[in-house]
Amino acid sequence: MFPLCIFDTTNCTSCGNGALDPEEECDGIDFGGSATCADINAGSATEPLLCTDSCTIDLSNCSGCGNGTIAAPEDCEPGYGPNAKPDLGGQSCEGLGYDGGDLDCSKSCRFDEGGCYTCGDATRNGVEQWRRRRLRRQGLQRLPERHRRPVHQRLAGMRHFLHHRHVALHALR
């Protein structure tokens, strides 16, 4: 008898298949019936919608993005000029579920989470290195209790890391 082979599709995404799926804002040219920035109240009818490679609407083509006012479906307003700061609408990395970092706004009025970090994700981020040195200078070995993540969150981060490195989870149990 031959062994049964089954594809593991748990890490597969449907983004890029040309069809709008429930977790997507767009896919290719499929915007769920919308076609212009006016259709989503982000600009005029002469401005066509754009879709990113991660199946989110790119608002950089819409005149509503960058006008200084955060309006749905925008996350934020980018800061223009040499010293201008983005308007994040009061949001932060922590508010998005990260442990800290610097949230920014992309030119397409979407949160840029590239400066956010998560402790316990098995990746040493530059900010975490700085924090460790700062703690040592202050004579501390660990973060104060109010800044620590619960054990189940740290373990979940480690499991996620191991899973994506193709390490069998059953070996950890």
Image (cartoon, grey):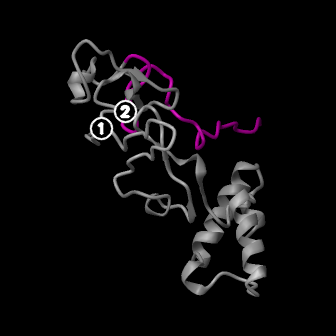
Q: Label 1 neighbourhood size at 10 Å, few (<14), some (14-19), many (20+)?
A: some
Q: Can residue 125 be seen in this view?
A: no
Q: Is residue 126 left or right of residue 58?
A: right
Question: Circles 2 and 1: CB distance less than 8 Å?
Answer: yes
Q: Residue 17 carries which label?
A: none
Quarter of the image for residue 27 reads: top left
Q: Residue 73 carries which label?
A: 1
**Kind of residue at disc 1:** Pro
Residue range highlighted in magenta:
1-29
**Kind of residue at disc 2:** Glu
Count the numbered circles shown.
Answer: 2
Q: Quadrant of the C terminus?
A: bottom right
Q: Is-magenta flag for residue 57?
A: no
User: Which residue is tagged 2?
Assistant: 25
User: As rendered, which of 161 and 44 lies closer to the eye?
Assistant: 44
Residue farthest front in this picture: 82
Q: In this view, does 172 lie to the left or right of 12?
A: right
